[in-house]
Image (cartoon, rainbow, N blue to C red):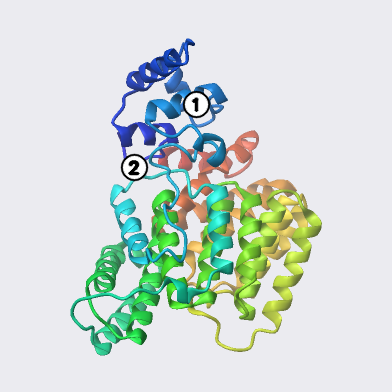
């Protein structure tokens, strides 16, 4: 199976369990017979279910499918479609179980599958994880390790090296991902096998959290959503173990952003509410509130979205100190552009375009990936205002930038604009843009 294209969750489950289309259909028919019933499931039906726009199987078919895959049928209604399927599992541990290193290793194992997937964490589970983080004392999660003593100087060298790598511009991440993987393996190995003082242990946990968060973003940008979610889960474990609540809030924000990117706004609101309970830094609170506004706007909750935008503006206006590293990039540019994105979702393209163009002008050159995403927002707002030729030019700029960066997530977002432009093929620049995205997919 081609690991370099989107795979439907059923196809992922079949790959994990080594089942063909015909195998799954036969297993579902056998499951029906065990219930003294019949099933007409064929390999053609399974193939139809795996199409991108297909409706999910019926509740009865899902029960049969669960039995065919060896999944407890009770998980089907609990986790919901398609999160109960093998290969799309949720993290097996919550915070405070003493399994921080296990979570870090599990993220690494998931990433090794290198499968582009369309799922993050099941909404019910990642909201539970957020609630767990918001209420549990980090001291309960600490544990001793055995082995050689880790020198503080060596940890300092690791910290400096990782900071230099993660501080590189986005295009360079394509060349540093393997190095970051190596540092991650080294740090997790120290946490597993070495002896260290409590201060050194905290530094190692924070370093592991930082690496896992960065690696999660790299996987996210390449649409390996399951791997990204597991890295962020591991990062949350390590940050919690170290007692860094601001970083933990940021990681929850990343999970919420992924949920929104995949079209799930409601659970993102719940997660961001939990995140806001345990972070005090104004810049961090501004970012969390802004993402909450995005989630509300996605679900059409205009008043809640505007309240969250107001909260984001207020928090950013009172930010005077140095913010946590994970949100140090948050600026008035982000506030303006994401406010514009909210206004697009709320059906106000004119004010949205004003906010977005204002924000793009403020973005530094080092944030080209963000610029590609935001130019896509601008193109969409222009189409909704009827400025089709301007929209096509802007979309082409976004596409060229995303192609240079190699971020498949951004490329997919831009190519999705093709459906918006289809009715306007005769407008200047539109046909060229549509041909370009057609040849690049």
Instruction: Say which residue label 2 marks.
Output: 4
Looking at the picture, tell me which residue is in the foreground, 344 or 125.
Answer: 125
Looking at the picture, tell me which residue is in the foreground, 389 or 364.
Answer: 364
Q: Is residue 243 above or below residue 30?
A: below
**Dot label at residue 361:** none
> What residue is drawn where x is 49% and y is 69%?
367
Q: Where does residue 276 sit, x and y in percent of width and height?
A: 64, 70
> What residue is drawn where x is 33% and y is 51%?
110
Outermost residue on the left side: it is: 148
> What residue is drawn where x is 26% and y is 69%?
192
Q: Where does residue 429 sit, x and y in percent of width and height?
A: 57, 45
> What residue is drawn where x is 60% and y is 76%?
279
- Mark 2 crowdedness (10 Å alpha carbons): few <14, some 14-19, many ≥20: few
> Which quadrant holds the C terminus?
top left
Instruction: Say which residue label 1 marks.
Output: 63
> Which quadrant holds the N terminus?
top left
């Amino acid at each position: 199976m081609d690991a370099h294209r989107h795979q439907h969750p059923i196809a992922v489950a079949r790959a994990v369990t080594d089942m063909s289309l015909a195998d799954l259909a036969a297993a579902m028919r056998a499951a029906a017979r065990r219930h003294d019933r019949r099933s007409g499931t064929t390999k053609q039906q399974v193939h139809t279910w795996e199409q991108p726009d297909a409706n999910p199987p019926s509740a009865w078919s899902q029960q049969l499918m669960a039995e065919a895959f060896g999944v407890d049928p009770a998980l089907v209604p609990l986790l919901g479609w398609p999160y109960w399927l093998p290969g799309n599992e949720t993290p097996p541990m919550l915070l405070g179980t003493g399994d921080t290193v296990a979570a870090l290793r599990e993220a690494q194992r998931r990433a090794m599958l290198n499968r582009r997937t369309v799922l993050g964490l099941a909404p019910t589970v990642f909201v539970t994880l957020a609630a767990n983080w918001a209420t549990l004392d980090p001291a309960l999660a600490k544990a001793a390790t055995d082995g050689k003593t880790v020198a503080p100087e060596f940890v300092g060298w690791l910290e400096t090296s990782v900071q230099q790598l993660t501080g590189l511009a986005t295009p360079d991440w394509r060349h540093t991902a393997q190095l970051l993987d190596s540092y991650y393996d080294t740090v997790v190995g120290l946490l597993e096998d070495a002896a260290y003082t409590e201060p050194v242990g905290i530094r190692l946990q924070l370093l592991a959290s930082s690496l896992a968060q960065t690696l999660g973003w790299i996987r996210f940008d390449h649409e390996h959503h399951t791997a990204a979610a597991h890295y962020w889960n591991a990062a949350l474990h390590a940050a919690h173990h170290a007692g860094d609540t601001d970083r933990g809030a940021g990681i929850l924000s990343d999970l919420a952003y992924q949920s929104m990117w995949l079209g799930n706004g409601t659970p993102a609101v719940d997660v961001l509410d939990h995140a806001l309970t345990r972070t005090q830094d104004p810049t961090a609170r501004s970012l969390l509130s802004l993402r909450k506004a995005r989630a509300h706007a996605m679900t059409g909750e205009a008043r809640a979205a505007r309240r969250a935008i107001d909260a984001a503006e207020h928090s950013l206006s009172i930010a005077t100190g140095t913010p946590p590293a994970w949100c140090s990039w948050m600026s008035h540019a982000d506030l303006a552009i994401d406010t514009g994105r909210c206004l697009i979702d709320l059906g106000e393209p004119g004010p949205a375009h004003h906010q977005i163009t204002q924000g793009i002008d403020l973005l530094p050159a080092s944030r080209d990936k963000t610029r590609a995403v935001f130019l896509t927002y601008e193109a969409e707002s222009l189409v909704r205002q009827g400025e089709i030729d301007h929209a096509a030019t802007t979309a082409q700029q976004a596409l060229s930038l995303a192609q240079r960066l190699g971020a498949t997530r951004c490329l997919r977002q831009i190519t999705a604009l093709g459906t918006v432009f289809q009715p306007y093929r005769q407008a200047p620049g539109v046909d060229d843009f549509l041909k370009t995205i057609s040849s690049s997919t």
